Image (cartoon, coloured by chain):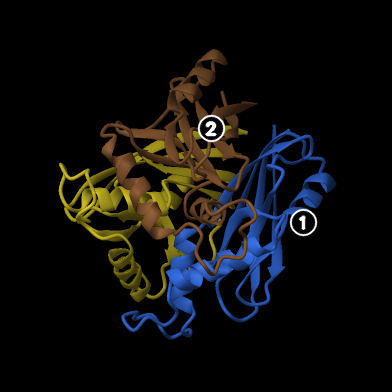
Chain colours: A yellow, B blue, C brown
Amino acid sequence: MKQVSKELVVHTHGRELLEITTHINEWLRQNSLQEGILNIFIKHTSASLTIQENADPDVLVDLLFYFEQLVEDAHPEFRHRAEGPDDMSAHIRSALTDVSLTIPVMNGALNLGTWQGVYVFEHRTSPHSRRIVMSFIGT
Amino acid sequence: MKQVSKELVVHTHGRELLEITTHINEWLRQNSLQEGILNIFIKHTSASLTIQENADPDVLVDLLFYFEQLVEDAHPEFRHRAEGPDDMSAHIRSALTDVSLTIPVMNGALNLGTWQGVYVFEHRTSPHSRRIVMSFIGT
Amino acid sequence: MKQVSKELVVHTHGRELLEITTHINEWLRQNSLQEGILNIFIKHTSASLTIQENADPDVLVDLLFYFEQLVEDAHPEFRHRAEGPDDMSAHIRSALTDVSLTIPVMNGALNLGTWQGVYVFEHRTSPHSRRIVMSFIGT
């Protein structure tokens, strides 16, 4: 059993779902990590992680639409406004999704379902650099 | 320290919360897994996992009711419709709950609170076979 | 590689976000836990865990406000009412946030982002004692 970790930096383009499955699998392959679990952790509170269908891109469009309705930008009752109208809604969207995902690793790759992809869910409207820590435990 | 994993297949009956706590504890017992952590990962994007009260079955009824209100089936703005009116809402319900849960293991069983049970949360209205990966790390 | 776990009891004061980052880092330090992952698991279904900004306290005020709107107390359709008007809404708020968080550990402390703190999210309106299991795996 060993433990290996690495920080990955992802550049987002504003509010979007950006798939990182290939980046993660590439890192597993380069380090010959075969069987175990991989934790993925995003070091931010206005972007998050989610696993979603990566077959039909309309799923991502609909998800973005849904969260626009669910968490209003610049709600008049919000006090936290210093960083812009999309900031407090970003914190809430982050709380409703995930900052940490643990995924099984098998045969040197993420053991995902056929249609699953791992996404960074950027909640801010402007581009950001997002730091993600990958921590593998296994063989 | 060792690492043991196993895929479990669960048959759901349409939209429901189906408890799997006993299945998981049985697997831990059969493999003499004593102390550590267990990751449970569902390999789908239209069913998810959650931990809820398993004492009063009305909690599950109310949860299902709440999610019906929160995420409308067949919202007129949804583009992803090919798999039926309950499919895009299922992806969203999945994003709002969990695809991955990590739970402590103590004395050969899940170290849950008195009223906690582990559930598969089926979001589709028709029965499905759902694949779940259990990954144990510990002693 | 080793595995160390500990149950922490936290006393909440009613509906609030209570930061526990310092308690967790103190435990890591006392046990000389250096590199790996830490799982934090709350043994309840009416309180949860979340990672949020710990710089501006208004973020916590706005989060509490948002969840008051999102999940109504004592919704007339709820059946589960025996434990009070805030109980079923607490179960739902728990399902929408996290009962389990896995966080990387580096140099003997949680490897959090600059503005991230770990919080117990108490959803009941009265004070409670909440049990949290910390499970470390690493070196």
Frontmost residue, A41 versus B117? B117
Q: Which structural element holds mark 1?
A: helix
Position of C135 relative to C93 (above/below): above
Residue in the image at 61% along x and 58% along y? C81
Q: Chain of mark 2?
A: C
Frontmost residue, B72 versus A9? B72
Taking C107 as reference, is C37 left or right? right
Name the residue type under label 2: Leu
Residue in the image at 23% along x and 52% along y? A77
Name the residue type under label 1: His
Residue C38 marker: 2
Residue in the image at 48% along x and 53% along y? C93
Frontmost residue, A4 versus C26? C26
> Which residue has dot 1 on it?
B23
Crowd band around label 2 with a 10 angstrom C-alpha radius: few (<14), some (14–19), many (20+): many
Image location (x, y in percent) of residue B2: 70, 36
Taking C102 as reference, is A18 left or right? left
